[in-house]
Image: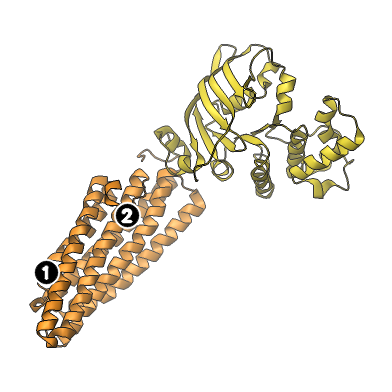
Chain colours: A yellow, B orange
Amino acid sequence: MQNENLTLKAEARNLNFFYGEHKALKGINMPIYDKKVTALIGPSGCGKSTYLRSFNRMHDLYPGNRYEGEIRFHPDNTNLLASEVDPIEVRMRVGMVFQKPNPFPKSIYENVAYGLRVRGENNKRVLDDKIEHALKGSALWEEVKDRLHDLASNLSGGQQQRLCIARALATDPELLLFDEPTSALDPIATGAIEELVHELKKRVTILIVTHNMQQAARVSDFTAYMYLGELVEFGKTDEIFIKPKDKRTEDYITGRMG
Amino acid sequence: MSDSQHLSSQFDEDLARLRTHVLQMGGLVETQVSAAIEAYTSGEVAVVKAIVDNDRKVNDLEKAIDDDCAHIIAKRQPAAYDLRLVLGISKIVTDLERAGDEAKKIAKGVQRIYENGHFPTQYGVGIRHIAEAALVMIRQSLDAFARRDVLQAQSVIKADKDVDVEFKSIIRQLITHMMEDPRTITTSIDIISIARAIERIGDHAKNVSEQVIFIVEGRDIRHLKEAAK
């Protein structure tokens, strides 16, 4: 990878997170670069999903959860975790796609329109336009343009996942979070999502949690290896997978016992 | 580099077998080079024939090891040290196979000289010396691979310089010979090709050592200026 100018999109600063008494994230400091894909890898329970979910304040939904430290969001340098920052506003800027496709029990059209309607957008022409744009962005438009008002649950698993990506894209987020987006999909649908991630990074910054190391190697520009709530190593994906600096990273990506 | 075991013991076995095969192939090439040196002094036809026959075994091992590398990449998707090991081995066997080819060239050159009723030892005086040096380089580069020994690998790379210098001095010597007595030209040209083959063996040992450094440390030092190595 040649030297290029990297712009910070977000930045975790001394981030700690507690599920009640349990400290799940320990002093994470990490940059997220603009219009790049950053992969979070690590064994189950290492805190990668907890970290990912902090970016759109998902933990706020449960009592007893507590953040310490900051996630700075650029260019405006907002601390996403500050209590005066409205989580709804955060989620407009930071979209999320989950492990299992979870379309609403509505039509394809209404699924994508949902976030826009929540924002108060009801003009049909604007909605039509934005929905087409979002569905094209998620590479689903050609497959569904003639049946936009069919139920979303009639789509295949891979199509449903791309619908969820369209739904997340509709509000023009600046950062998209993917939590193991392909673990419930077959290899063909997985390939389509990976190709999509590659396309999407032209317009949006992406943070992706994956258990599939080869997927991390294929889709990401940067990789972070987490273990027991700590960030062990962060670096360019090319370097992490050929020449990691930390022995724990090496053991994990080469499939060795610690 | 990591010595701990993989979660898949099958993967450990695959990698261990791969390493063993490389060392077997290396051992065979070493024997070939040493036999070629022997043939140079003794001129024994049987030795020359054995070298030519054994070269086929070297070629077969190269293909078998490359095939194993492809299988490991397809089945295991190795990363980090494992990936460097598999990539490095795939390059090392190419160099070993070529070093084997050079041994065969030496043997055939020796055969031609003796068939013409000459004795090569009358001409290139330094040949035996440079050949021994190249043989040591091959041996040490294989040791460096077996022990993941970067220092050993670096000393082989340094030794290649000396072999190159000696090669040039042998050529100068032979040119003088040829000018003094044109009847020696045919044999001298055969000896030049033998010297060239020995010098190439040194180059291959150097390449193997460069791969050892890549495998162990992840540094690609090929085509770098001396200071950067």
Q: Is residue B201 visible?
A: yes
Q: Three-letter amino acid code at disc 2?
A: Thr
Which quadrant is the N terminus of chain B positioned in?
A: top left
Q: Which mark is residue B126?
A: 1
Residue A152 is at least partly visible in this image: no
> Is A67 left, or right, of A226 in this rendering?
right
Report the front residue among B109 and B229: B229
Q: Secondary structure at mark 2?
A: helix
Does A231 sit above or below residue B136?
Answer: above
* Numbered circle sitting on residue B20: 2
In this rendering, is residue A170 above or below A2? Answer: above
Please report, as a chain letter, where disc 1 is located: B
> In the drawing, does residue B97 fall left or right of residue A23?
left
Residue B8, given in percent of the width and then of the height, sits at 45, 43
Amino acid type, label 1: Gly
Chain letter for the residue marked with disc 2 in the picture? B
Residue B99: give x, y in percent of width and height.
28, 66
Q: Using the rendered view, name the quadrant where residue A93 is placed.
A: top right
